[in-house]
Amino acid sequence: MRRPPLLAAALALACLAAGPARAEVEVDLALVIAVDISFSMDPDEQALQREGFTEAFRSPVVHDAVRRGALGRVAVTYIEWAGAGDQRVVMPWTIIEDAGTARAFADELAAKPTRRAARTSISGGIDFATRLIAESGFTAARRVIDVSGDGPNNQGRAVTAARADALAAGITINGLPIMLKEPGYFDIPDLDIYYRDCVIGGQGAFMVPAREKGQFRDAVKTKIIMEIAAAPTPGPAGPEIGGAFVIPAQATQPRGNCFAGEQQWRDRMGN
């Protein structure tokens, strides 16, 4: 059956307006940097966290790691998270393929204001990051969520459930537990063990604990270099690399309580 001329013309115009299907962009790595902005992160810690990432992307070592990839380009987005319903994109997906694009990313990130918010939902941050990767429009040889924070999950679904869904989607989760001060009211003393056993996971997953302010920038740089370069994860001994102590996922028998944050909140707040 022939379509009426007006209908055929309308269909043709609609197809032209829609244009061809957008092809996904190939990159070596799709990386979500997910940073904790909960109230437990004091302004000094927030400043160190932001400076650590901006300095990493200004580093010639990181630029070289990008160039050495099979395609020579990576896609990066930077998000902030706090409570279960509080996640925001600070830097949208950006392709980094040379020193110029890396420095531009760092400069724009450095100019963004910082903020703080209530509660700590690592699971919410992981879920948000997982959706960002799925909807990114990039075809990546590796997909990584880089989580940094100074406390355990205390809101939202179990962090292990969020991790399981991310790993099922082929995503690796790496961690940077921030342990710069004595544990406070809603902190736990062994955050590195918690991150190792409850947060990180996937192919080649690792964490780099930051225990001293002077070490923080090196810890961030080490982590970014290893993620971009797909550096082999060190053995269970966890040697120092670039001044930062690197610990692979589940290096020893798990011994962390993955509901420590929820139990602590319930015991102290009653809900």
Image (cartoon, grey):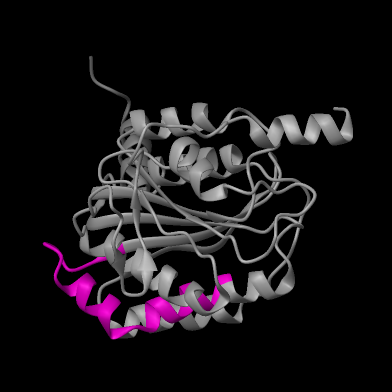
Residue 29 lies left or right of residue 147; in this view the side is left
- Return the residue nearer the eye: 202 or 131: 202
Residue 30 lies left or right of residue 45; in this view the side is left
Percent across and percent down for residue 31 are 37, 56
- Return the residue nearer the eye: 181 or 59: 181
Is any part of residue 23 visible from this angle?
no
Residue with the most extreme top position: 1
Residue 90 lies left or right of residue 94; in this view the side is right
Which image quarter is the N terminus in?
top left
Percent across and percent down for residue 3 are 29, 23
- In magenta stretch: residue 63: yes
Q: Quadrant of residue 85?
A: top right
Q: Which residues, given as a range, are shown in magenta?
A: 49-74
Measuring 32% from the left and 25% from the top, which residue is drawn there? 4
Q: Quadrant of residue 149?
A: bottom right
Measuring 41% from the left and 59% from the top, which residue is drawn there? 208
Residue with the most extreme left position: 70
Residue with the most extreme right position: 270
Which image quarter is the C terminus in?
top right
Percent across and percent down for residue 38 are 71, 55
Q: Quadrant of residue 59?
A: bottom left
Looking at the image, residue 98 lies above or below residue 229:
below
Is any part of residue 269 visible from this angle?
yes
- Return the residue nearer the eye: 139 or 193: 193
Looking at the image, residue 145 lies above or below residue 92:
above
> In this figure, what is the number of numbered marks?
0
Measuring 71% from the left and 32% from the top, which residue is drawn there? 262
- In magenta stretch: residue 100: no
- Return the residue nearer the eye: 28 or 239: 239
- Examine the residues drawn in magenta and state their main secondary structure: helix
